[in-house]
Amino acid sequence: MSEAAAGLVARRIVMTGRVQGVGFRPFVYRLAHEYGLGGQVKNLRGDVEVVVCGPKASVARFERDIVARAPPLALPAIRSAEDCAPPTAGGFHIAESSASDAPQVSVPPDFYACNDCVRELTDPSDRRHRYPFINCTQCGPRYTIITALPYDRPNTSMLGFPLCAACLREYRDPLDRRFHAEPVACPACGPHLEYCEPGAKRISGDEDALAAAVAVLREGRVLAVRGIGGYHLVCDARLEQAVDRLRMRKRRPHKPLAVMFPQCGDDGLDAVRADLDPDADESAALTDPARPIVLVRRLDDSRLAPSVAPGLAEVGAFLPYSPLHHLLLAAFGGPIVATSGNVSGEPVLTDAAEAEQRLATVADAFLHHDRPIVRPADDSVVRVIAGRSRPIRLGRGTAPLELELPTELPEPVLAVGGHLKLAVALAWGRRIVVSPHVGDMGTPRSEKVFGQVVADLQRLYDVQATRFLCDAHPGYATTRWVQAEGLPHSTVFHHRAHASALLMEHGVEDAATVFAWDGVGYGEDGTLWGGETFTGRPGSWRRTASLRSFRLPGGDKAGRSPWRSAAALAWEAGIECPVAVPDPIVREAWQRGLNAPRSSAAGRVFDAMSAIVLGVLEASFEGQGPMWLEARAGAQGEFPRLPLTRDGEGLSRIDGSPLLDWCADRRRSVGERASAVHLALADAICNVAVAERERSGIALVGLTGGVFQNRLLTQLATGGLEQRGFRVLLPGRIPCNDGGLAYGQVAEHLGRLAGAAP
């Protein structure tokens, strides 16, 4: 009897998305057995091919549930589904991976230690009890250990750890949770810890090394710990002396430090709630599988050291995401500072010998392990703004981030972003992949890691870019690198990239008015932009408004010297600077136009007001003054209205000068003056949007650029716009800061291609 006559059907289903390295094939195997279907499942260098044969109703349910019931870490989608010839072999099996098909690779990010593995970690009867590298198909490292694709054990840094008999049985059993869990290991066959302290004998053995590391923390000293994507510098987060010691040695006097809390309680957040006050959205972000650093309000009676986040009302908090972190936090019994193990601004260090050499003056001791880290991945950072968790930095757990393009590219392109908060993007066909955070360019290590990430993305995805995209700033290291490579390249102006990123992320084809506000970016007239408003769509933007420009004394120096921005705004308004000017020669140079480029940057306006209101004359990290200003501000109060005028070119200009007298008036409290800055600028945004709607009829408004990491400004502007009948777009998956520039460069490039099409 034929298959059709027996009421049987056979289907070939090709699955795409995140379907490798997440236990998808074992899931398909179990699902097929549940429905009594025959066939096979196999990898296709990124996609997964499933052939099933059985009763028509059962096959239909299988095809539905292959998406609906997929494992939590999988993000599958059906690329194609068609009838096919029934398989010749009986039963259902998992076939060997294939490398012969066209590449449709998806590189998974690194994942947290899942609840099942954490339970085994603490179970004395389990053979992996207290093993610092326990994992399964639903957790553990991915991006940082992959050397090639398809994602199989020989193509990872676990190649040097042959499986013992017990692990091999689990690895080969399709019904086991560790079937083809590529990093799988146990104490008998896997990586191990080593403790090192200068001048002392190295300590091997997981328990002894861990005990020595915990002793360092209890003594108030600084420890460097090798994690999944690199090293952390850690110390007791409740001991002011320990935090001060770390700050002094790392030469990081004010920049906030992240704090890792033990995971305990029903939802894992009891320890967090002892010091912080997470709302429902922040709690969800903290317990997300990505385990990002989440900015959370500090309790008034928090026991965290005051110097963890000086001048701020929030602390960057996260939960342990590797088994080693779980063991370390549980043994220590309290929260620890866990900041990137690097030289400031550079990518996190990954190599043990290099870490010992470069962190020798910072760390008192080192907790190493011998699982090789192929490439660095710093921690991801998010902040809940306007009711949604929004990325500040893409990193471990969130990147590589793959998204779909609205139209197909005619050739593969590589976008290299800007200069600070660097991430790169590879795009081809209808796909774009954004790399994890690389760091700030300008040092040999940053440029080395940048080159590695560029090469790795193309090699892993088996895609060779034939065109580069870069920022228009001629001085950026990434722009110079692109020019030196000799391939065809296109430049994209900084703020157009910001605006285009926002619209492409939301899949918007209609025209919009987008505010692109940040610290500084190279403008199309050769000045330093940063308070711009564009109307249009990717590839066809029209600059319609801007903050009134002013000459910045010292140019780039203004970013770390807020007094310079205060002086610039005051002198431009024809009044004396309300804060001290350290060197009177600066004014003379400013008057003569020497090293005083014009700027319209909103970030510099915030810098100026932080200098006037808070006395932040010098900043030890980017954004220090504006962050402190936000921390002191409220959402209500009086504020000056900022005039909106037209210049000779028909551009609407926001005049921020009324803020000078207001913020210099010491009869008002610091909180009132800090609030006025946010309220006045949010009101100005609304007024510009209304004026543009009257002119063009556009009621769709976007807010992007690094300034909109400021939650208070963003929520005030969003609320005001919505009250006036606007639909508001905010970045949701792509950072609004320069970490999203590479994505935006691709978006702008696509827009240009669409505009040039006949």
Image (cartoon, rainbow, N blue to C red):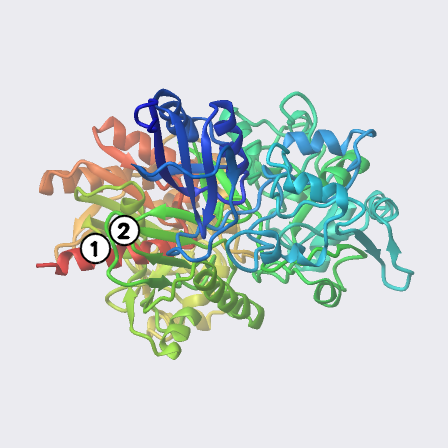
Looking at marks 2 and 1 on the same chain, the residue that comes earlier in the sequence is marked by 2
Q: What residue is drawn where x is 20% and y is 46%? A: 644
Q: Nearer the viewer, mark 2 or mark 1?
A: 1
Left or right of 195: which side holds 618?
left
Q: Residue at x 67, y 46 (%)?
A: 338
Q: Please state which of residues 650 and 536 is positioned toward the viewer in this rendering.
A: 536
Residue occupied by mark 2:
500
In the rendered structure, the answer to whether residue 38 lies left or right of residue 662 reads right
x and y, in percent, of residue 322 in the image: 67, 42
Disc 1 designates what residue?
Answer: 751
In the rendered image, the vertical position of residue 351 relative to residue 171, given as above or below: below
Report crowding for label 2: few under 14, some 14 to 19, many 20 or more residues within 10 A (C-alpha).
many
The residue positioned farthest toward the front in the image shown: 1
Q: Find residue 752 and report its horizontal and vertical position in percent.
A: 19, 59
Say left or right for 747 vs 320: left
Residue 580: x, y in percent?
50, 59
